[in-house]
Every structure is written in structure tokens, then in C-alpha cells.
Image: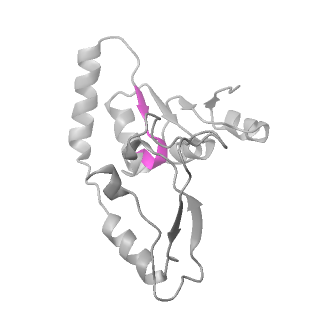
């Protein structure tokens, strides 16, 4: 699909949308920008003219249709996962294997996946948020857990109790 086809022009309707929102149509990587995905130009520095794009209001039916179209499922063979971890450990030799199970093990279910990874030889686990580490502890994970994301000072006491390793950010 060409970049021009991806760009939405102002939609014309017989009745103007009451709840339509106007927002700048910013350049994105999909439209030919050299910036990385998810990044926008700094405020006030958009290249070229800024176009306003009208979007019709999202109705309950439209939202349901969109989410239904995006629904997906993931089936994990825990025996294959365990065999894969054991194979990695054998191939890598005497190094530590950190299993990253952030975002509920990428949707696979951290409470189900992490104990299998630990049993197969994962030496450590990594998550983004402290609460993900607490959930792993509740699932019975005993190996060290590294929290990669930001934690507030108020999280420190509970994190120490749960034996989580917090990271420092600047």
C-alpha cells in the first residue's frame, strides 16, 4: 500500500460528526519517515505542513468490531518450551540464562510459563514492573527476579521482601 493510500483525508459526511476529534496527522515510519516506530517529531518541529485529520467518533459497535478483528490466541506447548530451555542451556555452556517474562510472558501466562522455565534451568527471570515479580513469587518462582522498569522508593520494602532486584534509572 502506498504512503498516500495510508494517509486519511478529512472525512466528509452528510452530517458533521459531533464528537469527531481533530489531531495533527504526524509523519510516521509507515508513511516514509526515518524516525523509529512510536516516535514523533519534537513539538513544533513537524516537517512540512501539518494536516488536521477528522476521525468519526468510536461507537460501541465499531470498537467491538475492531477488537474482534484483532483478537488472537497463543498456544504454548510447555513440554516443547522446557525442551527448548534445556537445549539452550546445553548449547550455551556455563552461562546464566535469563527468561524475560514481562507482560504476562508476552500473553502466554507468566504463572504457567515461569515455573516450567525454572524447572528447565532458567537461572533468573526479568520483568518490567515490580507487581509482575510479585506474581511470579506467588506462582512459586524461587530464582532471582530482575525488575527492568522504574520502581518508586515506596516499592523498595515490598521488593526486598519478595527478593526482587530493582534497577536504577537516570
Nearest the eye: 98 or 38: 38
121 horizontally vs 51: left or right: left
Residue at the limit of the structure toward the bottom, as seen here: 15
In the rendered view, tell whether residue 80 sits above or below residue 7.
above
In the rendered view, tell whether residue 97 sits above or below residue 139.
above
Question: Is residue 103 part of the magenta span, yes or no?
Answer: yes
Question: Is residue 160 part of the magenta span, yes or no?
Answer: no
Q: Coloured how?
A: one colour
- Which residue: 66% across, 36% down? 150
- Which residue: 36% across, 36% down? 117
Which segment did they paint magenta? 98-105
The percent position of residue 83, horizontal first and vertical second, equals 22, 33
The percent position of residue 88, horizontal first and vertical second, equals 26, 23
- Picture quadrant where residue 168 is located: top right
In the rendered view, tell whether residue 58 sits above or below residue 77.
below
Residue at the limit of the structure toward the right, as seen here: 154
Nearest the eye: 127 or 6: 6
- Which residue: 58% across, 43% down? 46
Residue at the limit of the structure toward the front, as seen here: 49
Q: How many marks?
A: 0
116 horizontally vs 78: left or right: right
In the rendered view, tell whether residue 95 sits above or below residue 23.
above
Residue at the limit of the structure toward the top, as seen here: 94
Nearest the eye: 139 or 36: 36
- Picture quadrant where residue 158 is located: top right
The percent position of residue 79, horizontal first and vertical second, equals 22, 42
The percent position of residue 119, horizontal first and vertical second, equals 35, 34
Amino acid at each position: 500500500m502506498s504512503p498516500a493510500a495510508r494517509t486519511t483525508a478529512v472525512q466528509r459526511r452528510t452530517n458533521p460528526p459531533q464528537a469527531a476529534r481533530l489531531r495533527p496527522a504526524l509523519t510516521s515510519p509507515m508513511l516514509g519517515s526515518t524516525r523509529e516506530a512510536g516516535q514523533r517529531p519534537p513539538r513544533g518541529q513537524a516537517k512540512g505542513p501539518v494536516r488536521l485529520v477528522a476521525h468519526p467518533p468510536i461507537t460501541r459497535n465499531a470498537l467491538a468490531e475492531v477488537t474482534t478483528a484483532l483478537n488472537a490466541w497463543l498456544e504454548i506447548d510447555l513440554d516443547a518450551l522446557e525442551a527448548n530451555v534445556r537445549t539452550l542451556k546445553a548449547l550455551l555452556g556455563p552461562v546464566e540464562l535469563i527468561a524475560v517474562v514481562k507482560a504476562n510472558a508476552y500473553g502466554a501466562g507468566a504463572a504457567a510459563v515461569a515455573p516450567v522455565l525454572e524447572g528447565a534451568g532458567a537461572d533468573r527471570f526479568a520483568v518490567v514492573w515490580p507487581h509482575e515479580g510479585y506474581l511470579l513469587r506467588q506462582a512459586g518462582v524461587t530464582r532471582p527476579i530482575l525488575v527492568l522498569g522504574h520502581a518508586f522508593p515506596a516499592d523498595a520494602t515490598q521488593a526486598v521482601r519478595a527478593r526482587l532486584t530493582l534497577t536504577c534509572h537516570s
